[in-house]
Image (tube, rainbow, N blue to C red):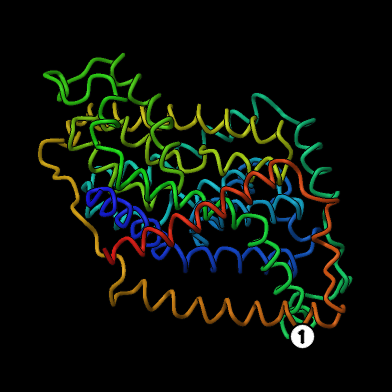
Amino acid sequence: MQDFLQAWNAAATTSLGFFWMALWAFILGYLISSLIQVLVTRERMQKAMGKDGPRSVLLGTFFGFISSSCSFSALSTTRAIFNKGAGLAPSMAFMLASTNLVIELGMVIAIFLGWQFVVGEYVGGIILILVSWLLIRITRPRRLEAQARKHQADTDEEDSEGDISWQKKLVSLQSWQNIGQTYVMEWQMVWRDVLIGFTVAGMISAMVPDSFFQAMFIGSGGENAANPGFLAVLAQTLVGPLAAFFTFIGSMGNIPLAAVLFGQGVTFAGVMAFIFSDLVVLPVLRINAGYYGWKMALYLLGLMLVAIVIAALSMHYALAALGMLPDFSAVTAPGEREYFKLNYQLVMNAIMFTVNLALVWLWYKAREKSHGHDHRHDHGGSSLTDKVLSALAAVSVVWLSGGLIAGLF
């Protein structure tokens, strides 16, 4: 019983610790998304990124890099620019860049895994974008794209301020109230997925033995782990996204587990595929389905899986040809992490939480002005999926609360 209480407490603490690490990025990502939706006109977005050509893809990559964020907020911002008229390829470039070409992610990878994985993350991220762009040009999903835009148009809010420039909107109280409303709406759409995802991530991290993940990667930890054949490398690369599915929360939280996998003999390609797979997990699929419809969500899932495998294998064999593959025996698995301490995350969380309170206050004032009714959230009742998610979210709250209380015993 004592062991279970300790594991329960560790799971709850880990879940909250992971969320604490990502909190400022969540708020910043949804703020950027809300600013784009309110300040940027559809015509301006179509002019900058409305095509699927090199210039638009390059702009999407650059904007994604400078707005680097976690998976959930990247999804929201991508939805905003796509809804404003950006092409599918530039939108994908933005999403992939904002989750893979991330400075803080590179720093964490360097600490846990070494410089080769940092190179793999950044160069591989560019390969992901290029392969996705190529696949979009080959498959030409015009019909799916049109259906996705129609799906978004059904719940799209008309710009109540017409053709006012973004400079004037930026100093308008009405615009900031609209930004507050949009910000709160973004959280309302994904808070259950976030809560459930982080809860499950903590449970997996604290309660599932490392040997479970090692068993998933065929050929890891054996005599040939240092020099596996192509089939073993391919198999581990294909398993990488499946293993990431169990962790839910994306690359930032997956890096310590990736170090565990590499230390146990999983190939460079398998670990990179695992790290790249933050956008092919179930919560992301469900959110994309809500944004674009299930057909487009499944298309994007397949597109990214193919791109992930190609990028991971390309980086593995490129480093192998140069004699630069890292030695897994030199990597030690990370121990227990101290999440809540005085560091840059505390400062960033304090700043962004203050911003969060201001945006919620603006939402409240706008709601008060409209007599407590925000018509953008009326979608004709709850679906079965919504009810199931609400039930799971309630269970998650009970689990996390119980885990914290278990620490007292």
Image position, residue 158 (x, y; %): 87, 63
| Of residues 32 and 334, the one drawn nearer to the viewer in this rendering | 334
Residue 151 position in % (x across, y down): 81, 43
Name which quarter of the figure residue 227 lies in: top left
Q: How many marks?
A: 1
Question: In screen coordinates, is 259 left or right of 285?
Answer: left
* Position of residue 18 in the picture relative to residue 390 (left or right): left
252 or 41, which is in the foreground?
Answer: 252
Q: Where is residue 18 in the image (x, y as percent from the top left)?
A: 38, 58
Q: Which residue lies under the disc numbered 1? A: 173
Query: Does the image show residue 58?
Result: no
392 above or below 131? below
Kindly state the secondary structure of the residue where label 1 is placed.
Answer: helix
Which residue is at a point 45% across and 32% down the rendered structure image?
308
Quarter holding the C terminus is bottom left
- Mark 1: amino acid: Leu
Residue 87 percent location from the top left of the image: 71, 44
Quadrant of res 32: bottom right
Q: Can residue 299 be seen in this view?
A: yes
Relative to 405, residue 122 above or below: above
At 67% from the left edge and 56% from the top edge, which residue is drawn?
189
Query: Crowding at label 1, few (<14), some or many (≥20) Cα neighbours within 10 Å?
Result: few
Q: Residue at x 31, y 30 (%)?
A: 269
**Would residue 387 be found to the left or right of residue 373 on screen?**
left
Residue at screen point 21% across, 47% down? 114
Q: Quadrant of residue 232?
A: top left
